Each structure stands twice: as structure tokens, then as C-alpha cells.
Image (spheres, helix red, strand yellow):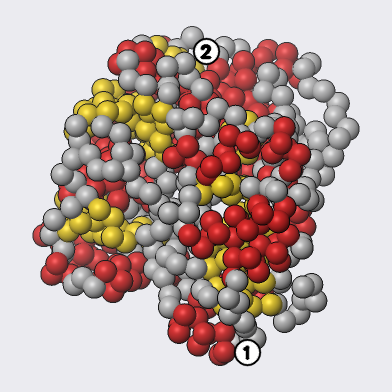
């Protein structure tokens, strides 16, 4: 069976073609439109998928979509919000005013600078009018309840409008292709569970999904065995850890659903004990479930962001996320006795959270689906329809298009760029990196999902911590986490602690580990302030050319790790076409471009 999987159209619209449980092609519309997290019907991605696979529209047996009919979705979340009102009215809420007063006594006067902040105790600068409103809608029992219920109602109105609008776009787009009669709708969280389980290689696993919203839920736990998935419990929206984290991302001045990674990095600089008690007092955890009091009252996070240092607010929300999710996982691990956890859903893009889940007592194996956000739902839905049972685990996520040397050569010559084709390619590139050059690598099929995994990556040595400032500046980025490292698979234990059971997850850069002293000494640019790193472990059989560059660098330096950051400019998707790569290379003033079998020196750079 050949299934065309289409992820939700509200953001990061993504297309997958799956045949009998095998992914043939998968890529986001953003890579072709060049508009980050592109929404709407993915015309370009479908066209490219069919062209790349050599299939025609008539070859498609089913079209899988990871949301139910708009009317059904509305019916479900309308019931949820009635349940939420009952919970809000019954909950014994803590006194926010006194909790904030106590928390302020615990804020230290910091001196050490944090790159990206004007001062270490920087807060959000808000007017008196804004602060007054935040105080009223956070501290007053009646006004805060009203703000939460109004927030949920506003969300429902936007959600209803969105479901119907995107449903029309979906049906119109499929009709133009003659595929409207082949549409099959899949429960959103089932699609997350399916991609995590059916790509993990485990015969038996506990599927944990956590996100903002999907078919009435913000999370689920399922028992997966012998290729079958049985849901054990669902977390009703709006008790959403994804929404909670979106709120703090917005309140700290960043873009929700895009910049949550900045909060993860920022959190390590703060003291979680200042505000975590307040946040945890608003969450009810019981019998493998949790409910978040006033989940859609965004004004509390905005009040905290204006009253407390950004780093302490970020630290508290990150800590709360870790505590709640870890307790949720722990309950179900103990209840089922299953020691293997597979994760999916946008919340599991949080690599620090994934480390905490792996550290839960009783969890011995973990896998995180590489495209864990909604962009991966189309694949999950397609796998669910077409899979014949448990398959061997996926070895890579290189599911996008590739380009031939002839196509690359034509573009280089069109741009007037000089190039060479070194015989000792890997050794040459490794030596350039060792000498302090920034090298962008463009080779093979494009990565699927949010992580660059070597084929659309920028590489540099990790001996220089300052690279996180000057290279990010060159690329137009502001980040609070260091660049991630790529490490030779066989040297993982030299660099990271407690890797066993999470090695495969680490091949996709989806989890952090505490670093060894050797890693901290040899590759400080990749180690965060909290002593962790988010590695990609690379095996030669997965990506020969990428591995060989790192292996040659290891021979020269004795260090089995390099910096790997995504090949793109700020707020742009990862490069897709040869033209994208050349433009980003020139605009970013990178020293070298290793593209196909060619090596290009930036015409304006003098470094060799």
C-alpha cells in the first residue's frame, strides 16, 4: 500500500510517501517555499515527493491526515472546555500574591554577564498599565478565573475557525489532485504514537506523546506490542505542557512554536527554586494524569516575566515541565512494567526533558521520533495505515531530495564560483576545519525534521567556546544554548555519561547527556553551562562522507567531535536546493562550502 501522509496544515505542513511501512520521501513545505514553518496545503512538497519517487497521483492508495473532521474536533474540544470550567471552580487555588512575595526574597543579585542579555537579572520591560492588568488577572481569584476561561474560549474560537479553514484547504487541494476520495483521517495523538513506535524497532514499548493540542488531547500514553497500539490514557486539553511552554516563550519575548529552544538554553542560567513552587502548586497530579489550573491564563507568565529575571522564569517553567512529565512517565512505567519508552509530540523537542525522562527509574531504553512535532504526524498517520507490523528501526532521517554533481556544477558556474574536486576529500575538509575554517556541508538527501544531521550542516571545531557568539552573529542568530556536537558513535562513552539505552535516540540529536571531563576539556564550545550537550552520534554505515570527515579530524586532533549547526540563515528553513546552499554560503560569509564532490572557497575570505 502506498500512502501519502500530510501533516496538519496549521503550521509546518509536511508531506510523506510511505510504502508498506517504509518511508520513501518526507519533507516540509517550508524547504521549497523558503518560508519557515510554512502552513497551508503543501503543493510544492507533494510535487517534489511524486517527482522524486517516480510515482503518479494514480499510484496513491490512501491519503492520511492527522486530524479528525472539523465538526468532530469542535465537538471534542467544546466538551473539554466545559470540563475545564468545572475543574477551575473546584480547584483549591494557592494565593499568588503571597507566593510571588516570597519568591522575590530568593532572587540573587547577579554580576556575571550572560551573552544575549543586557544584564543577568534582565526582566521584560512592561508599562505600568500592563503590569497592573497582569496583577489583576493573576492575583485576583475571580478575575484570574475569568481570564483563564476567556482565554480558553478565545482559543476555541480560533481553533474552530482554523479547523474549518484548513479542512477546506485540504479538501480543495486533494480535489485538484483527484485524491479527495482517498482521504483517511487519523486521531492526532495516535499519529504521534505511531511514528514513535513503528520507527523505533522495539516490539514492545510505552508510547508517550506530549504536545500543545491534538484531537482533544495534550498528551497520551499507549501500550504498543506486536505492531499494535492501545491507548491507556489521554491528557485532556487544555492541561497542556505544550501550551504552558508556549506561554512562557511568548511572555519572555520570543515566538511560540518556534523559539522554545531558546527557553531551554536560558533556563540553565537561572534558579528554578525561585518560582517552581508557585507553578507546581497550580498543577494537580493524580493516578497517572495531571491537570493545569487556569491553563489558558497567559497573564501569570507575563506577570512573572515582568517581575522576575528572565533566566529564573525560564528555569522554573523548564523545571516544572520536567517534574510533571517525569512523574507522568514514571507512573505508567511502574504500572505497566515496561522499561522502553518511545516519545513524540512537540513537547519532546525539549532535549533536556528527554534526558530527565530517560533518567526516570525503570526506564532503560528510549527513542524519540526525529520529526517529533506536528510535521511528523503525516508520516505517523501513513505508517499506521500501511505498516504490516514492527519493522527494524530507522537508521537515518535523510528522506528529502538530493541533487547530482552535474546540477551542483551548473549552479556553481552560473554563480561564477571557483571550485576544486580533491581526491582526499574527507582529509582535506578535516584539515580545513582543524585550521579554524567554518565549512558548510551539502551532500546527499536532505534531512527530514528540525535537526540538521550532516547533509545540510555547518561544521567547525569545538575547541573555541567563543564560536557560539561570533558564528551565531554571522548567521544572524541569538541563541542561549551552545552549538550541538557530532561525535563518532564508537567514542560516545568517552564524551558522554549514561548513554547506554539512548544511543539510537542520540543519532538524531534528540536528547542531552551529561558530558565527561574529557568532552568538557576537548570540545568546550559544545558544552552548555549545565555540563550537558545534545550530540549526534554518527556511524559510518549511516553517512559515510560525513563520518569520514569527522574520522579524519579525529586522526589530526585526537578529538572525536565537531560542532554541527544547521545550514541556514536566521529565521530561514534549512537549505534545500543547490541555489539555497550557495546563497546561504555567500550571505553567511562561511569560509568553505563542501558541496557534493566539490569544494568552494568563499571569494571574499582570505583564510585557508
Quadrant (top left/top right/bottom left/bottom right) for the C terminus: bottom right
Horizontal arrangement in the rendering, residue 126 relative to residue 73 (left or right): right
Q: Secondary structure at mark 2?
A: loop
Quadrant (top left/top right/bottom left/bottom right) for the N terminus: bottom left
Residue under label 2, please give it: 93
Q: Looking at the rendered structure, which numbered label has been put on residue 346?
A: none
Residue at horizontal 59 percent and vertical 25 percent from the top: 319
Horizontal arrangement in the rendering, residue 57 relative to residue 79 (left or right): left
Residue at horizontal 78 percent and vertical 22 percent from the top: 107
Residue under label 1, please give it: 416
Q: Secondary structure at mark 1?
A: loop
Expressed as whole percent of the image width and height from the top left, the position of residue 250 reads: 59, 42
Expressed as whole percent of the image width and height from the top left, the position of residue 261 reads: 58, 43
Expressed as whole percent of the image width and height from the top left, the position of residue 312 reads: 70, 28
Q: Quadrant of residue 48?
A: bottom left
Q: Quadrant of residue 403?
A: bottom left
* 46 up-or-down from 332: above or below: below
Expressed as whole percent of the image width and height from the top left, the position of residue 101 reads: 73, 16
User: Is residue 256 visible to the viewer in this orientation of the structure?
Assistant: no
Q: Nearer the viewer, residue 474 or 120?
A: 474
Residue at horizontal 57 percent and vertical 89 percent from the top: 413
Amino acid at each position: 500500500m502506498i500512502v501519502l501522509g500530510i501533516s496538519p496544515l496549521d503550521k509546518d505542513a509536511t508531506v510523506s510517501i510511505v510504502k508498506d511501512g517504509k518511508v520513501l520521501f518526507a519533507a516540509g513545505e517550508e524547504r521549497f517555499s523558503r518560508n519557515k514553518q510554512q502552513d497551508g496545503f503543501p503543493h510544492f512538497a507533494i510535487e517534489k515527493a511524486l517527482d522524486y519517487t517516480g510515482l503518479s497521483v494514480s499510484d496513491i492508495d490512501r491519503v492520511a491526515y492527522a486530524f479528525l473532521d472539523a465538526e468532530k474536533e469542535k465537538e471534542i474540544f467544546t466538551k473539554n472546555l466545559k470540563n475545564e470550567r468545572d475543574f477551575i471552580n473546584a480547584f483549591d487555588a494557592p494565593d499568588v500574591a503571597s507566593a510571588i512575595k516570597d519568591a522575590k526574597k530568593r532572587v540573587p543579585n547577579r554580576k556575571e554577564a550572560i551573552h544575549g542579555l543586557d544584564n543577568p537579572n534582565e526582566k521584560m520591560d512592561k508599562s505600568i498599565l500592563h503590569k497592573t492588568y497582569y496583577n489583576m488577572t493573576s492575583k485576583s481569584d475571580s478575575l484570574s478565573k475569568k481570564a483563564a476561561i476567556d482565554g480558553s474560549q478565545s482559543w476555541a474560537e480560533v481553533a474552530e475557525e482554523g479547523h474549518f479553514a484548513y479542512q477546506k484547504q485540504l479538501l480543495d487541494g486533494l480535489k485538484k489532485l483527484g485524491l479527495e476520495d482517498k482521504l483517511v483521517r487519523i486521531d492526532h495523538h495516535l499519529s504521534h504514537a505511531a511514528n514513535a513506535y513503528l520507527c523505533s524497532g522495539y516490539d514492545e514499548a510505552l508510547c508517550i506523546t506530549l504536545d500543545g493540542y491534538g484531537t482533544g488531547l495534550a498528551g497520551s500514553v499507549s501500550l504498543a506490542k506486536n505492531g499494535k497500539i492501545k491507548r491507556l490514557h489521554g491528557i485532556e486539553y487544555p492541561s497542556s505542557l505544550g501550551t504552558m511552554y508556549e506561554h512562557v516563550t511568548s511572555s519572555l519575548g520570543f515566538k511560540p512554536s518556534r523559539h522554545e529552544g531558546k527557553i531551554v538554553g536560558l533556563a540553565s542560567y537561572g534558579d528554578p527554586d525561585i518560582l517552581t513552587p508557585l507553578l507546581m502548586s497550580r498543577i494537580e497530579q493524580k493516578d497517572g494524569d495531571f491537570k493545569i489550573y487556569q491553563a489558558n491564563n497567559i497573564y501569570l507568565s507575563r506577570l512573572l516575566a515582568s517581575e522576575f529575571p528572565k533566566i529564573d522564569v525560564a528555569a522554573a517553567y523548564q523545571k516544572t515541565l520536567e517534574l510533571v512529565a517525569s512523574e507522568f512517565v514514571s507512573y505508567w512505567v511502574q504500572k505497566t512494567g515496561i522499561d522502553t519508552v518511545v516519545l513524540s509530540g512537540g513537547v519532546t523537542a525539549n532535549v533536556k526533558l528527554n534526558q530527565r525522562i530517560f533518567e526516570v527509574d525503570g526506564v532503560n531504553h528510549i527513542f524519540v521520533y526525529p520529526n517529533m512535532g506536528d510535521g511528523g504526524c503525516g508520516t505517523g498517520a501513513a505508517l499506521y495505515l500501511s505498516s504490516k507490523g514492527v519493522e527494524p528501526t530507522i537508521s537515518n532521517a535523510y528522506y528529502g531530495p538530493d541533487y547530482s554533481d552535474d546540477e551542483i556544477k551548473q549552479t556553481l558556474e552560473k554563480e561564477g564560483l571557483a571550485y576544486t574536486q580533491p581526491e582526499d576529500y574527507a582529509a582535506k575538509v578535516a584539515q580545513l576545519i582543524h585550521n579554524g575554517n567554518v565549512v558548510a556541508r551539502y551532500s546527499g538527501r536532505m534531512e527530514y525534521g528540525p535537526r540538521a544531521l550532516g547533509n545540510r550542516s555547518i561544521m567547525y571545531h569545538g575547541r573555541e567556546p567563543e564560536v557560539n557568539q561570533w558564528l551565531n552573529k554571522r548567521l544572524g542568530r541569538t541563541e542561549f544554548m551552545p552549538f550541538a556536537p557530532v561525535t563518532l558513535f564508537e567514542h560516545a562513552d568517552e564524551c558522554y555519561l549514561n548513554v547506554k539505552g539512548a544511543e539510537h535516540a542520540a543519532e538524531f540529536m534528540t536528547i542531552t547527556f551529561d558530558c565527561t571531563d574529557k568532552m568538557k576539556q576537548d570540545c568546550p564550545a559544545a558544552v552548555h553551562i549545565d555540563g550537558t550537550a545534545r550530540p549526534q552520534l554518527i556511524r559510518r554505515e549511516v553517512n559515510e562522507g560525513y563520518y569520514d570527515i569527522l574520522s579524519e579530524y579525529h586522526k589530526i586532533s585526537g578529538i572525536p567531535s565537531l560542532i554541527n549547526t544547521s545550514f541556514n540563515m536566521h529565521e530561514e528553513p534549512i537549505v534545500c536546493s543547490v541555489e539555497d546552499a550557495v546563497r546561504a554560503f555567500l550571505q553567511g560569509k562561511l569560509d568553505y562550502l563542501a558541496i557534493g564532490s566539490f569544494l568552494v572557497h568563499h571569494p571574499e575570505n582570505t583564510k585557508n
